[in-house]
């Protein structure tokens, strides 16, 4: 007789090993999946998202009601919310990914060795990907679509705040996989929202090849401490715009406003504005008036407050904070080196931008600033896979290895060496 302490349920209380076994088997089948079948699955998924809009909005309303009852922040609620517009964007994104070239099987240029042996590298899936994320139900669709298009199997673990929305979306994904003749276990969702399941998931090296977390700093820090499975980390976005001495001030005004107010809750929102002292008196009062009209609270250094008396004094905590809210820190700097020093100290290597007409300053900034994306004369809110032409992305990686910046299809693949010969023997 099996005792309670040694029963399968006690060894795998959340059923994660079963998900892992199923995913590993599905990943083998996805290796052989044809590009047309993967594209068809995504097109069916897009159709179902639109067909089931009413159901998705009803399920999302349950999550939003719970979020407000639990006093979640406005930024969290913004990320959680689905709408007709966002569902249409979701469907459009699925079709865009479906239409993109299949990366799997693509080979690099072949090198022919002196013995006639042909050497190349082939792009292949990572295998089984575990996605751990909070709030945003669109991640359920985006992550599944990118993983499937790149030939991977995926295990999704969403947050409790999006439970109803995520279950409705995984049903759509399963129906689309079945319709396209692909294994339904290529996309699975962890059934529990128990935090202990996350701890188990990030140590399942036998079943999961890489973990991709999406969430707040606390979640990422916890996973980095506990994970034995390799991770592609997507950390906070403490993003800066630096207005240089040689900036076009009309352009600088519009870029700074767009960088902050396009959407407050995205990781590419500007959180600190750096302004060269030579142009501060010309640009800051104008920006202050625009930000005041938009309800943005300002925090500033002493020189900033001399020009904007309504700004509160900025502290180190302000320079370090990803607000995800209508709050902006402003610092006046003496030169580009001081701006880059500030970014090096307080930035999170996410997205940084310079506004300048000086080619030398632009070149230095892009070369010397250490971030996954560095812009010239653009707002930081362009940090998004669609804007880069990658389609939907799983997130913005601040890792140095494997994938950096928006992680799209290629970021979910790797390369293997493929050699072809005609009976050559070593040493002969």
Image (spheres, grey):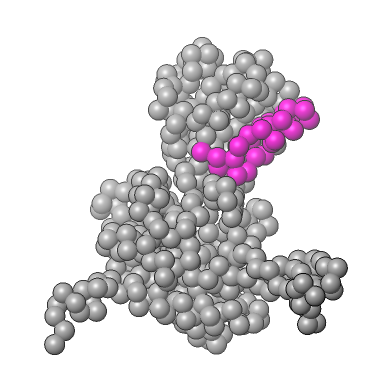
Magenta part of the protein: which range?
Answer: 348-375
Q: Is residue 80 left or right of residue 112?
A: left
Task: Answer left or right for 101 relative to 329.
Answer: right
User: On the image, which quarter does residue 125 sit in?
Assistant: bottom right
Q: Is residue 317 magenta?
A: no
Q: Tell me if I can see residue 375 in this picture.
A: yes
Quadrant where the N terminus is found in the figure:
bottom left
Horizontally, residue 251 falls left or right of residue 82, namely right
**How far across and how far down the image is residue 121, in percent?**
71, 67
Q: Residue drawn 73% across and 23% down?
A: 246
Q: Is residue 155 above or below residue 250?
A: below
The image position of residue 242, as x and y in percent, is 62, 28
Picture coordinates of residue 301, whole percent (x, y): 49, 18
Foreground of the two, 243 or 103:
103
- Locate residue 123: give its quadrant: bottom right
Residue that sits furthest to the front in the current view: 427
Compared to 59, does 64 lie above or below? above
Answer whether residue 359 is magenta in the image: yes
């Amino acid at each position: 007789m099996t005792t309670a302490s040694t029963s399968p349920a006690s060894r795998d209380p959340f059923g994660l090993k079963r998900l892992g076994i199923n995913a590993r088997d599905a990943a083998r089948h996805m290796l052989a999946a044809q590009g047309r079948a993967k594209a068809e699955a995504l097109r069916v998924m897009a159709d179902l998202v639109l067909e089931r809009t009413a159901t998705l909005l009803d399920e999302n309303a349950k999550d939003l009601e719970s979020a407000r009852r639990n006093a979640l922040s406005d930024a969290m609620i913004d990320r959680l919310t689905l709408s007709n517009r966002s569902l249409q964007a979701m469907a459009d994104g699925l079709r865009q990914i479906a239409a993109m070239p299949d990366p799997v099987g693509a080979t690099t240029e072949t090198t022919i060795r002196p013995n006639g042996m042909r050497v190349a590298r082939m792009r292949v899936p990572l295998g089984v990907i575990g996605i751990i994320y909070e709030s945003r139900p669109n991640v359920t669709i985006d992550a599944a679509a990118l993983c499937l298009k790149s030939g991977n199997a995926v295990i999704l673990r969403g947050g409790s705040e999006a439970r109803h929305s995520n279950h409705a979306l995984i049903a759509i994904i399963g129906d689309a996989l079945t319709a396209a003749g692909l294994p339904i276990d290529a996309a699975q969702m962890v059934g529990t929202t128990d935090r202990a399941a996350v701890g188990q998931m990030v140590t399942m090296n036998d079943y999961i090849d890489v973990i991709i977390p999406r969430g707040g700093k606390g979640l990422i820090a916890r996973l980095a401490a506990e994970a034995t499975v390799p991770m592609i980390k997507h950390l906070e976005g403490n993003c800066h715009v630096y207005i240089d001495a040689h900036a076009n001030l009309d352009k600088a005004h519009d870029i700074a406003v767009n960088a902050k107010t396009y959407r407050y809750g995205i990781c590419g929102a500007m959180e600190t504005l750096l302004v060269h002292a030579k142009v501060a008196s010309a640009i800051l009062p104008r920006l202050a008036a625009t930000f005041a009209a938009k309800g943005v609270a300002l925090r500033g250094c002493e020189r900033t407050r001399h020009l904007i008396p309504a700004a509160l004094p900025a502290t180190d905590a302000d320079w370090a904070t990803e607000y995800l809210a209508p709050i902006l820190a402003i610092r006046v700097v003496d030169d580009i080196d001081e701006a880059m020093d500030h970014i090096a100290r307080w930035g999170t290597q996410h997205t940084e931008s310079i506004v300048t007409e000086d080619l030398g300053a632009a070149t230095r900034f892009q070369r010397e600033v250490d971030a996954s994306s560095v812009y010239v004369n653009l707002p930081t809110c362009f940090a998004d896979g669609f804007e880069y032409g990658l389609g939907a992305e799983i997130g913005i990686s601040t890792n140095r290895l494997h994938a950096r910046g928006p992680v799209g299809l290629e970021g979910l693949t790797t390369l293997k060496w493929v050699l072809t010969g005609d009976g050559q023997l070593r040493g002969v």
